[in-house]
Amino acid sequence: MTFIKTISTFLITLLLATTAFGQGSKHKTKILLIGTIHFETPHLDAHELKTDDFLAPKRQQELEELTGILKQTNADKVMIEKPLKEQKQIDSLYKAYLQNKYKLTVSEREQIGFRLAKKLNLKEINCVDIFYGMKHDSLLSVTAKEKNQLYLLKELGTNANNLKLEFDNIVKRNSITEVLKYINKKELLQKNLSLYLKYIAKVGAGENYIGAEAVSDWYLRNLAIYSNVITQINANDKYVILIFGQGHIPILKHLLQNNDDFEVIEVNSVLK
């Protein structure tokens, strides 16, 4: 009995030691979420920013400086806001770019994403976007009118335009690096997400919940993007950079912060 007890104690001790060692040795993948404005217009966003010329020499120099800073992360992957189904097309364009046979378009996906990946000597760019239509948007105004809630959509429009103007003023007065530092601050990310949670979610509440369903469309898209992100990261990846429209970042950040495989890195800790 004593011998059996000794063996049992040994096995339990070994199990605990092995578990502790496994937990200690497992690294968390660092992930830097960079929320950006869209450089090209027109775009599909309802309240889009009228951007300036990002192909101008001054902006091109700023992009070189920005990607020079980001290169210091030695990231293993760069992920961009391009649909997963377009991966082969992006592979072809990026390969041509590496061979100096392709001129970057104005899109931030290329101006930041391609440029950075090349500096990092990466063989490919990862496409992680997926487009889910906002299926309930068309019912929002109808429901709001029926329920005497048009004031909610009016307040939403006013606040969205104010946020757009705030971004526009920042873009006009600052370098691209400073713009990204500003729009990735916690309070600016919350302002964007609050447009959905403060106004849209109320429409039809208590009856048909069209507003809540419209918000769920936005969450569904970001959950699908998150799924693409975590699927394309493997155990050997120590650092990943994700470049996406600023409006996506609050939800993606929440999802990744609550997955213990990842350590979310704050933009302002890198872009000092």
Image (tube, grey):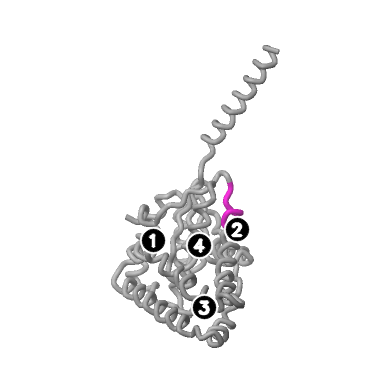
Q: Quadrant of residue 162?
A: bottom left
Disc with the residue nearer the chain's start (2 vs 3): 3
Type of amino acid under label 4 = Ile
In the rendered structure, which disc, 1 or 3, sits on the residue that comes first in sequence?
3
**The stretch drawn in magenta includes residue 233:** yes
Image quarter (top left, top right, bottom left or bottom right) of the N terminus: top right
Instruction: Read off the residue under disc 1.
Output: 186
Q: Mark 3 — residue?
A: 44
Q: Quick check: marks 4 and 3 in contact, CB under 8 Å?
A: no
From what the image shows, is residue 20 above or below residue 269?
above
Q: Callout 2: helix, strand or loop? A: helix
- Residue, disc 4: 251
Mark 1 is on which residue type?
Lys
Is 86 in the magenta? no
Which numbered disc, 1 or 2, marks the residue that appears first in the sequence?
A: 1
Q: Magenta span covers which residues?
A: 229-234
Query: Mark 4 or mark 3, which has the lower sequence index?
Result: 3
Considering the numbered disc 4 on the image, is that residue within a helix, a strand or a loop?
Answer: helix
